[in-house]
Image (spheres, helix red, strand yellow):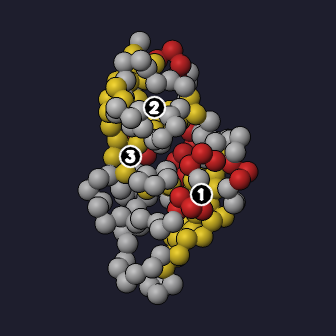
């Protein structure tokens, strides 16, 4: 089976960046065990006169998805829980809703993966086939990086919906 890493398309350099997101939503709480510490709805106010690009996937700060992408995720992971993030720019009369998926992390990072010297990032991603199971969309267990993976059928379904700001990268599998 083939798997793909879902990431924000780097070509969207003018995509939305949410100020102080880390102060309101701590990355360590984005787990099923600690998600109760995150508000059900978090509102972020954007400052500035520029109009940000609202794309369907943001992953620079937290892994946030749009409503249409959430609908696709729900086809493959119906029991996945979400927290709501609303971004508001009152000076431009703009508002966009995103969702923070709360995945159960899967310990499937292969020993063949290569990490950065400080172990905070994954330079070369290799997944352990035996640990994957039959999950269609899942999060790889890693303390510092959001690594979201889609099985081939789920990846194709996401790409067919013509969502913006999404890039898929084939992942190597260790059998």
Q: Residue furthest top?
A: 175
Residue for point 58% across, 34% down: 105
**Label placed on residue 52:** none
Count the marks. 3
Q: In which quarter of the image is residue 104?
A: top right
Q: Position of residue 93 (x, y in %)?
A: 49, 84
On-image quarter of the C terminus: top left
User: Relative to residue 140, is residue 69 depicted above or below?
Assistant: below
Residue tagged by mark 2?
A: 151
Front disc: 1 or 3: 1
Give how far apart the Cα atoms at labels 1 and 3 are: 20 Å
Q: Is mark 2 on a helix, strand or loop?
A: strand
On-image quarter of the N terminus: top left
Q: Quadrant of residue 84?
A: bottom right
**Label placed on residue 7:** 3
Q: In terms of depth relative to the viewer, which is nearer, 108 or 138?
A: 108
Crowding at dot 2, Cα within 10 Å, few <14 / some 14-19 / many 20+, comes out as many
Of marks 1 and 2, which one's residue comes earlier in the chain?
Answer: 1
Give the side of residue 143 with respect to residue 104, left or right. left
Residue tagged by mark 1?
A: 25
Front disc: 1 or 2: 1
Q: What element carries label 3?
A: strand
Q: Position of residue 158 (x, y in %)?
A: 43, 46
Q: Where is residue 43 in the image (x, y as percent from the top left)?
A: 60, 70
Q: In which quarter of the image is residue 67?
A: bottom right
Front disc: 2 or 3: 3
User: Relative to residue 162, is residue 102 depicted above or below?
Assistant: above
Of marks 2 and 3, which one's residue comes earlier in the chain?
Answer: 3
Q: In terms of depth relative to the viewer, which is nearer, 116 or 159?
A: 116
Q: In terms of depth relative to the viewer, which is nearer, 165 or 83?
A: 83
**CB under 8 Å between discs 1 and 3:** no
Q: Is mark 1 on a helix, strand or loop?
A: loop
């Amino acid at each position: 089976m083939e798997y793909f890493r879902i990431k924000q398309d780097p070509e969207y350099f003018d995509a939305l960046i949410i100020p102080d997101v880390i102060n309101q939503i701590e990355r360590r709480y984005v787990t099923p065990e600690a998600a109760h510490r995150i508000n059900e709805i978090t509102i972020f106010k954007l400052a500035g006169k520029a109009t940000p690009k609202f794309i369907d996937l943001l992953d620079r700060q937290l892994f946030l998805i749009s409503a249409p992408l959430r609908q696709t995720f729900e086809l493959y992971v119906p029991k996945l829980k979400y927290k709501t993030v609303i971004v508001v720019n009152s000076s431009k009369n703009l508002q966009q809703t995103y969702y923070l998926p709360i995945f159960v992390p899967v310990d499937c990072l292969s020993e063949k993966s290569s990490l950065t010297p400080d172990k905070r990032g994954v330079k070369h991603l290799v997944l352990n086939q035996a640990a994957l199971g039959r999950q269609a969309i899942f999060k790889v267990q890693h303390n510092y990086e959001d690594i979201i993976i889609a099985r081939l059928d789920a990846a194709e379904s996401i790409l067919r919906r013509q969502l913006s700001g999404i890039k898929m990268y084939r992942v190597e599998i260790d059998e």
